[in-house]
Amino acid sequence: MSRVYYTIADASLITQQTLEQIPNVVREWPCGILHMTGSRSVGMHGPKSDWDFYSQYDDVLYSNMIKGGWIDVGDWPYGGDPLLSTILSKDNVHVQMIKPNYMEAKHQMQAYLRRHRTSLYRMSKDQRREEYQRLAYALTRMIDGC
């Protein structure tokens, strides 16, 4: 069984009820670490929100997940996120598979989004996506030395 990890900042936004509602498909993740992301990780979810996580991309993990019935949906709906290798989906769960050299950048992005969630509430989903993309590209350029 996999472990789903949360940072202290995540934990303050995640209720026991939310933890109890984590779908079984997540509990069955065979290996690796899943980090919560998306609306649930910043306390902006509704009753019909999906479950979003991220994990470091690994060829063996990817192959096992495909064999286990997960579907590779490419980078939908994130359209060109430079941190992503791909997204795996099953039931109402999406796992962003992050390029190994960008895991720390993804952690930093999550911390930024949590710190600024109050201002994010005032943005539309498209505006939030644009803000995320802008920051993700800036981080990857710094990492890649461009």
Image (cartoon, rainbow, N blue to C red):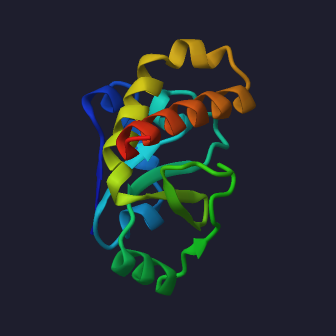
With respect to residue 113, does 24 lie above or below?
below
Residue nearer the viewer, 104 or 32: 104
Residue at the (43%, 53%) spot, across then down: 54
Q: Position of residue 71 (x, y in %)?
A: 60, 74
Residue 111 % position (x, y): 37, 28
Horizontal side of residue 4 vs 74, given as left or right? left
Q: Residue furthest front?
A: 146
Which image quadrant for residue 133?
top right
Q: Is residue 86 left or right of residue 146?
A: right
**Residue situated in front as seen by the camera: 28 or 37:** 37
Residue at image x 45%, y 40%? Answer: 141
- Is residue 146 shown above or below 2? above
Pinpoint residue 38: horizontal percent, then vertical percent.
53, 40
Total numbered labels: 0
Residue 9: in sight, yes or no?
yes
Residue 67 against residue 53 in the figure, above or below: below
Quarter of the picture containing the C terminus is: top left
User: In terms of image quadrants, where is residue 118?
Assistant: top right
Q: Residue at x 51, y 81 (%)?
A: 66
Asked whether residue 14 is in view, the answer is: no
Q: Is residue 13 above or below residue 67?
A: above
Residue 44 x, y percent position in the rendering: 57, 28
Q: Residue at x 43, y 36 (%)?
A: 139
Quadrant of the drawing holding the N terminus: bottom left
